[in-house]
Image (cartoon, rainbow, N blue to C red):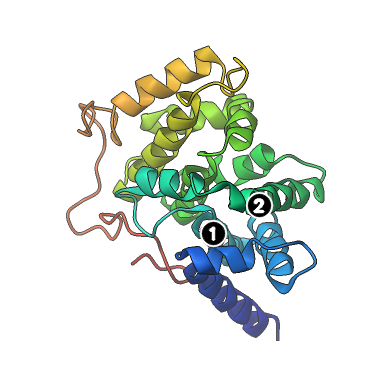
């Protein structure tokens, strides 16, 4: 039945995300479009930018892993930098990733930023897992110039990401901040032919947001007066949820 199919699809996406945690697994998936790996990449991107509910969350996490994001927020920026500065031989893999992202969005007559906005726009604990998946995907793809330019060009999405007041739980705060750090790293990267990937104004706003830390208080501290979850709240963890409706 449909529920069973959804469970199988979600399990397959989780397995794909595990593949993305190693270079060999990533290379196998970020293959030419006509290969089994290439078809798998297209399916993951399509699910991440369009499938409903838990399937879309699992797909976003799988795509994030393939793009270089680790399982936890700590060290995400460094891991992303390492993965996107591999030898030039992986240029084809990067091209495949970009094509898959834009193709999945185009199939819905949309852009990648517009599709991500549908994941992030809703506030509250009920949509926390969705937002964490989106932030983690941004933290991975944000190390690419083409994606940073795409995202910072979407005013509502960009403003949501740099505003620390939009999140109050550790997972949301930490992954939002990781997304900011990734975009800032791209904004501060050497310019190609003297052209900035991210506009100077957007770069300055990213720098200010990054300096505020995950909670907006500076140096990683909490902003004064910010609401915080209780000590017994299940939201006091920065780990990525690995099962539908559950955070580990």
Q: Position of residue 75 (x, y in %)?
A: 31, 48
Residue 20 seen in the current view: no
| In this picture, residue 233 sits left or right of residue 48 | left
Dot 2: element = helix
Query: What residue appears at the point 44 percent right and 47 percent down from the top-left corner?
Result: 80
User: Do callouts 2 and 1 mark residues in contact (Cβ within 8 Å)?
Assistant: yes
Query: What residue appears at the point 53 percent right and 53 percent down from the top-left corner?
Result: 67
Query: Where, by quadrant of the figure, is residue 243 drawn?
Result: bottom left
| Other-residue count near label 2 (Cα within 10 Å), few / some / many at <14 / 14–19 / ≥20 | many
Q: In this figure, which residue is indicated by the disc labeled 2?
A: 97
| In this picture, residue 200 sits left or right of residue 36 | left
Query: What residue appears at the point 44 percent right and 39 percent down from the top-left corner?
Result: 179
Q: In this figure, which residue is indicated by the disc labeled 1?
A: 66
Q: Position of residue 90 (x, y in %)?
A: 60, 52
Residue nearer the viewer, 214 or 94: 94
Quarter that holds the N terminus: bottom right
Dot 1: element = helix
- Does residue 47 sit above or below 223 in this rendering? below
- Separation of residues labelled 2 and 1 (CA atoms): 9 Å
- Does residue 35 sit above or below 147 in this rendering? below
């Amino acid at each position: 039945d449909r529920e069973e199919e959804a469970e199988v699809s979600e399990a397959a996406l989780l397995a794909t995300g595990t593949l993305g945690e190693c270079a060999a697994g990533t290379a196998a998936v970020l293959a030419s479009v006509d290969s089994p790996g290439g078809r798998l990449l297209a399916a993951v991107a399509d699910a991440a930018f369009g499938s409903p509910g838990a399937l879309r969350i699992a797909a976003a996490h799988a795509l994030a892993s393939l793009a270089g994001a680790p399982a936890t927020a700590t060290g995400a920026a460094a891991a992303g930098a390492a993965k996107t500065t591999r030898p030039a031989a992986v240029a084809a893999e990067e091209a495949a990733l970009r094509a898959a992202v834009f193709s999945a969005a185009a199939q819905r007559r949309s852009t990648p930023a517009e599709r991500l906005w549908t994941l992030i726009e809703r506030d509250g604990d009920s949509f926390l897992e969705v937002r964490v998946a989106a932030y983690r995907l941004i933290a991975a793809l944000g190390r690419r110039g083409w994606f940073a330019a795409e995202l910072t060009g979407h005013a509502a999405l960009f403003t949501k990401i740099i505003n620390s007041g939009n999140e109050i739980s550790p997972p949301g705060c930490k992954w939002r901040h990781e997304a900011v750090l990734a975009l800032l790293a791209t904004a501060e990267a050497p310019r190609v032919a003297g052209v900035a990937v991210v506009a100077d104004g957007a770069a300055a706003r990213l720098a200010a947001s990054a300096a505020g830390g995950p909670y907006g208080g500076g140096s990683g501290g909490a902003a004064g007066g910010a609401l915080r979850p209780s000590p017994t709240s299940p939201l006091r963890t920065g780990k990525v949820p690995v099962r539908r409706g559950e955070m580990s």
